[in-house]
Amino acid sequence: MTKQRCGLPASALGAAGVAGLASVRRLGRRSGVTDADLTMPLPGDDLVPGARVVIDRAVLLPATPDAVWPWLVQLGKDRGGWYLPGWIERLGIPAGSRGLRRIEPGLQTLAVGDDVPDWGPGDPVFRAALIDPPHTLVWLSKRQRSAGWRWPTDAADDDVMVLSWALVLRPDAAGSRLHLRLRFNRLGGRAQPVIAIAGGIFDWLTVELLARGLRERLG
């Protein structure tokens, strides 16, 4: 008697793999948003015309835009830090390096044109491009690869990555809805598809942790 093998047909496994990859790609580009959100113009879209990569995310926060806004203003490296949940901070982040859990008056002054350092590689900065309290904060960053990812002074387009990051707050039944849109002119060379997927998943994870950290602080 011939033994019958158990398991899924190769075609089913292949279909599952394709579906799984599609889900990962989708998560890398969007989360918490509707199809209408994706086509809705946001402030700052014009800063990176013809963006090759656009990532949209939205999270709900249990406070009004007026209460959330100060936390967004002080967000960032050498400022309020990145707001992670407490259990992650306690797991392995030194106390002095954790995101603030208070509103710091000295960090509430932010003007268009101000630079805030960003995490590496290199020495990139975000520059405040649009500020409309308590609803809209748009950052622009230009990073020259050959100059340690610093803001370029004079460089060819193929050596500079340009990105914008819009944070748009709107009132919601839960308190506020924060819509974040990240736009890139490029991610780089032949590895772009891989970088886009990996970078998108990393972006989803960081935004999810940011939302949880913010909810703790707002609560």
Image (cartoon, rainbow, N blue to C red):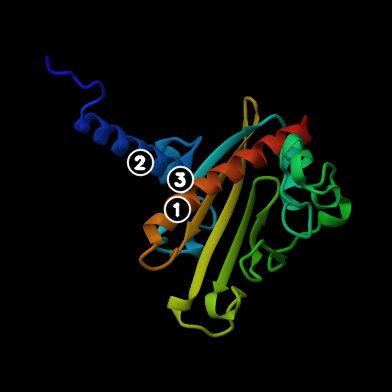
Q: Quick one: label 3, few (<14), some, or many (20+) residues within 10 Å?
A: many
C-beta proximity under 8 Å, tags 2 and 1: no
- Residue 64 in sight here: no
In the image as oriented, which residue stretches furthest toward the left? Answer: 1
Residue under circle 2? 21
Q: Amino acid at mark 2?
A: Leu
Q: Is residue 70 left or right of residue 195?
A: right
Q: Quick one: label 1, few (<14), some, or many (20+) residues within 10 Å?
A: many
How far apart, in angstroms, are the residues tagged by discs 3 and 1?
10 Å
Residue under circle 1? 54
Quarter of the image with the N terminus is top left
Tell us which disc is closer to us: 2 or 1.
Answer: 2
List x then y, in percent, for residue 22.
Answer: 34, 40
Q: Amino acid at mark 1?
A: Val
Q: Is residue 217 left or right of residue 47?
A: right
In the image as oriented, which residue stretches furthest toward the top? Answer: 1
Q: Is residue 206 left or right of residue 8?
A: right
